Image: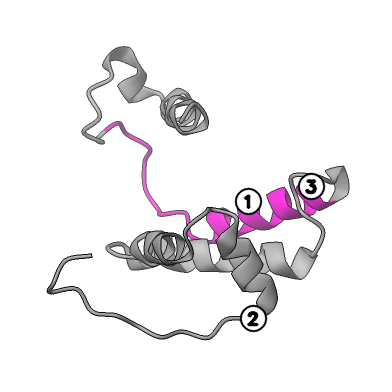
Amino acid sequence: MKAADKQLALRVSTDMYKELSQSGNVSDEIRRRIESFSGDEKTGALQAAIGRIARIIGTPWHKDPFAYEVFKAAIETLLAASKPEGEVRAKLPFGIGSLDDDPVMLGRGLAWGELSR
């Protein structure tokens, strides 16, 4: 922590604390989660909604096929509700060659990059 950083006291439920503790360092995990909301307000709202839906479902989506399908449908619905109008054209500055003009392949490539982290 830098000298200019500020300390914050925070109360969370026992379940939330257990979840945060799984990363090893509660402070770092809270900071990481807060920082993930910075910048784009719509993305932050989407992340928050996804988290709320995961908690409402109750059963971990990654451990139960039915919970997975519920979770997937919810996320697809959230994304569809936020779809921008207009023609789909390549204009993102990724510079990954021929993948630049195929949003599905580009998205899958980005996801595989995250999955391999």
Res. 41 mark: none
Q: Which residues are magenta?
A: 67-90
**In the rendered image, the vertical position of residue 4 relative to residue 50, given as above or below:** below
What residue lies at 39% left-to-right and 67% top-to-bottom?
34
In the displayed image of the protein, which residue is found farthest to the top? 98
- Residue at 37% across, 48% down: 86
Location of residue 33 in the rendering, given as x and y in whole percent from the top left corner: 43, 62
Residue in view at x 36 percent, y 18 percent: 99
Q: Secondary structure at mark 2?
A: loop
In the rendered image, which quarter is residue 21 located in?
Answer: bottom right
The residue singled out by tag 3 in the image is 69
Which of the two marks, 2 or 1, is nearer to us in this view? 2
39 with respect to 2 (left or right): right
Residue behind mark 1: 76
- Is 79 covered by the magenta stretch? yes
Point out residue 77 in the picture as x, y percentages from the top left corner: 64, 57
Residue picked out by circle 2: 13
Mark 2 and mark 1: Cα distance apart in space: 29 Å
Of residues 49 and 91, the one drawn nearer to the viewer in this rendering = 49
Residue 87, above or below 108: below
Please rate how many residues cluster around mark 1, counting C-alpha atoms within 10 Å: few if below 14, some from 14 to 19, many from 20.
Answer: few
Q: Nearer the viewer, mark 3 or mark 1?
A: 3
